[in-house]
Image (cartoon, rainbow, N blue to C red):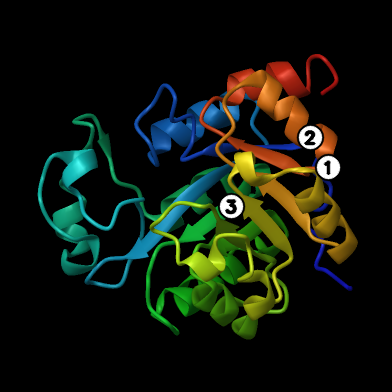
Amino acid sequence: MGRRPLFSGMPRPLILAHRGYSARYPENTMAAFTAARDAGADGIELDIQLCSTGEIVVFHDYTTDRVTGEPGRIDQQSWRQLSGLKVHGTEPIPLLREVFDTFGDSLCYDIEIKHKVHGASGIEQALIAMIASRGLEHRCLVSSFNPYAVREVRRMSERVPVGVIYSRDTEVPRVLRNGLGRYMCAADALKPQHTQYGFIHALSAKMQGREVFVWTVDEAEHMKRSVKRGASGVITNDPVCAVETLRAHGG
């Protein structure tokens, strides 16, 4: 089907640290990303949003309450305001440019766009420009639960691979819970919750030529089972466990 190559030259199965080494460090922070790299992860999964002044902020929730203890929406606060907050009281919120400039092409980046707009939000163009300016097209996968965001990225760039994320969570629209968003955006990769990745699902992905990265997988047996079924990689809160399970003992 002429799918774009994903993370060329990197090993399989790929180990992607979910929000960094988030089992031990504050999620989506430079500390978590550095620890993931040092633990042997091939890459990091991270979340991005635009703040009110247009910077690409690395942050999962739409609001700052849970992670920083301070109320407010990411898209309604300036970078100056957000830069003064601490994740779990210890680590600053990073910008995507800081992550790219620190790690360069030494890591792979699974970048999840966080927005619910049925169309372009502005973040897609800013993201593609930032990836291109650093020559990181070969190290990035752009994904989202929102197929409209993914489709916009695909429209803007033929060089950056894209993927759709899905699960059976009730917050996910029913029509998208089994990955049908792949057809809206010509997805190169699928990112199902690992409990959905059964034999039929794996066979379908293989026949379509789409690589699969399962999330969030923290137990060794689940990692082994997913890889045995054909997953190209695992997204995990515990990269140390993943390295020990999938590399040290041959997967």
Disc 3 marks which residue?
Answer: 110
Describe residue 178's horizontal placement relative to residue 78 as left or right.
right
User: Dot 3, how many residues are within 10 Å of its Cα: few (below 14), some (14-19), or many (20+)?
Assistant: many
Mark 2 and mark 3 lie on one chain; the one further toward the N terminus is 3
Q: Nearer the viewer, mark 3 or mark 1?
A: 1
Residue 48: image x %, image y %?
41, 58
Q: Quadrant of the N terminus?
A: bottom right
Q: Quadrant of the C terminus?
A: top right
Residue 86: image x %, image y %?
20, 38
Disc 2 marks which residue?
Answer: 227
User: Dot 1, how many residues are within 10 Å of its Cα: few (below 14), some (14-19), or many (20+)?
Assistant: many
Disc 1 marks which residue?
Answer: 230
Task: Tell me, yes or no, if residue 128 can be seen here.
Answer: yes
Q: Nearer the viewer, mark 2 or mark 3?
A: 2
Q: Is residue 36 above or below residue 160?
A: above
> What secondary structure is marked by label 1?
loop
Give the amino acid type for the residue marked by disc 3 in the picture: Asp
Marks 1/2: CA distance?
5 Å
Q: Residue at x 55, y 57 (%)?
A: 166
Q: Residue at x 43, y 53 (%)?
A: 47
Circles 1 and 2 in contact, beta carbons < 8 Å = yes
Marks 3/1: CA distance?
19 Å
Q: Residue at x 23, y 29 (%)?
A: 90
